[in-house]
Image (spheres, rainbow, N blue to C red):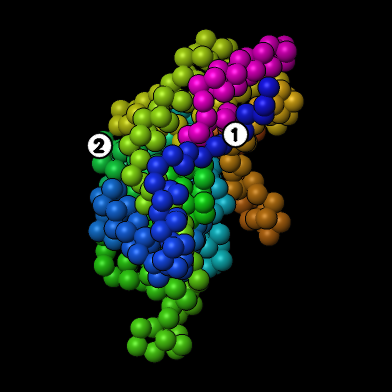
Amino acid sequence: MNFVPVNTPLLSGNEKKYLNECIETGWISSEGSFVKQLEEKFAETVGRKYGIAVANGTAAIDIAVEALEIGKDDEVIMPTFTIISCITQIIRNGAKPVFVDSDANTWNMNVSQIEAKITPKTKAIMVVHIYGLPVDMNPVVDLAKKYNLKIIEDASEMIGQTYNGKPCGSFGDISTFSFYPNKHITTGEGGIVVTNNAELAEKCRSLRNLCFKPEKRFVHEHLGWNYRMTNLQAALGVAQLENIEKHIIRKREIGNLYNSLLKNVPNIQLPLQKTDFSENIYWVYGIVLDKKLNVNAEFMMKKLADEKIGTRPFFYPMHKQPVFNNRGMFLNEHYPIAENMGDFGFYLPSGLGITDSEIEISAQKLINTLQTVKS
Ligand SMILES: *Cc1c(COP(=O)(O)O)cnc(C)c1O
């Protein structure tokens, strides 16, 4: 049996054709027309006016934080259970991340903990939709209005998902996406910032392009990055976007097949199939081991690797990261749900390129392995 990789992308549309077009015309840099096409089409897909394509999803968040001028001593309320991409620019700018714990059922930030964390220094709430179900946005939007806060929405894992019928990525003052190969559409590496605010859009464009000024090119008033996306990446993205609906249907099939294969397995928590406002799109198919098993995710993942099944651990909470603890940050903070997910959660092979038989093999190997560890 071959190894079942944790992710295989699906490149089954016009990817080759559009890439060939780039090569044949010589348009390979960020000046090419696919970049503009991707920005316009993607923004439209998620119901926003402006799209700014960038080098990756992390870059998109850096730009969002910078464009909203989150700086020294500003506080940003965010989940501790997320990827480090969300926090790096907040830290670099001398602002303060203020964490909330996760909801044990949806794995998303527990929005009922936000209000108590708001202070006069709070400038923004950063929401990060996790693994397939969106954050409950109505309470967040209400709080942002009530306290005059900005919303940054990291919708990297939610391309094609909706909350109460409204696209994820349409809720932030600035919303961001990643097009890494395990996302619902990919450009290899890539990402995008979207917004409805013309002024913010212009700022994001400038930050992406070293803050060159149109009038005086090599005279700068602000510090930016070279976070541009190439036409080659955008060519892939335009082709992928043509298939987004198919990709979402397939993702749900993958999730539902795992659900049916694993539904009676004791001592593991499966993803919720739906909430009041959304049906899961299973960006990844995650599980959380019950503490009763007396083994952690790391142990199970090694066992599964021996059985040729690829897995990945869940995110590890930000407040427990050595890089911050070594600087004396977050030392006495505890968020028990996020900590439990970080120790006991991992995900199974669930990329768009997976076959049904690979899913069946992965589920069966998981079941067998769990039986060997049961106390
Ligand atoms: C993938 C991901 C990112 C980072 O995207 P890159 O393109 O890998 O930089 C950021 N946030 C979330 C929630 C992600 O899943």
Which secondary structure lies at badge 1?
loop
Left or right position of 6 against 75: right
Residue at left offset 62%, top offset 33%: 5
The three-letter code of the residue at mark 1 reads Val
Q: Is residue 193 above or below residue 16?
A: below
- Above or below residue 193? Residue 131 is above
Counting from the top left corner in percent of width and height, residue 186 is at: 46, 47
Between the C-alphas of marks 1 and 2, the distance is 30 Å
Q: Which residues are magenta?
A: 347-375
Q: Is residue 150 above or below residue 336?
A: below
Dot 2, how many residues are within 10 Å of its Cα: few (below 14), some (14-19), or many (20+)? few
Name which residue type carries label 2: Gly
Answer yes or no: is residue 159 visible: yes
What residue sits right under mark 1 in the picture? 6
| 370 vs 226, nearest the viewer | 226
Q: Residues within 10 Å of mark 1 (few under 14, many from 20)?
A: some
Quarter of the figure with residue 369: top right
Nearest to the observer: residue 216 or residue 112: 216
x, y percent for residue 145: 27, 53
Q: Is residue 35 above or below residue 287?
A: below
Q: How many marks?
A: 2
Residue 37 relative to residue 270: left or right: left
User: Looking at the image, which residue sits at the far front?
Assistant: 24
| In the displayed structure image, the side of residue 353 where residue 116 appears, left or right | left
**Relative to 171, 331 lies left or right:** right
Q: Nearer the viewer, residue 32 or 22?
A: 22
Quadrant of the rendering where the C terminus is positioned? top right
Q: Give whichever of 14, 247 is nearer the camera.
A: 14
Which residue was labeled with disc 2? 165
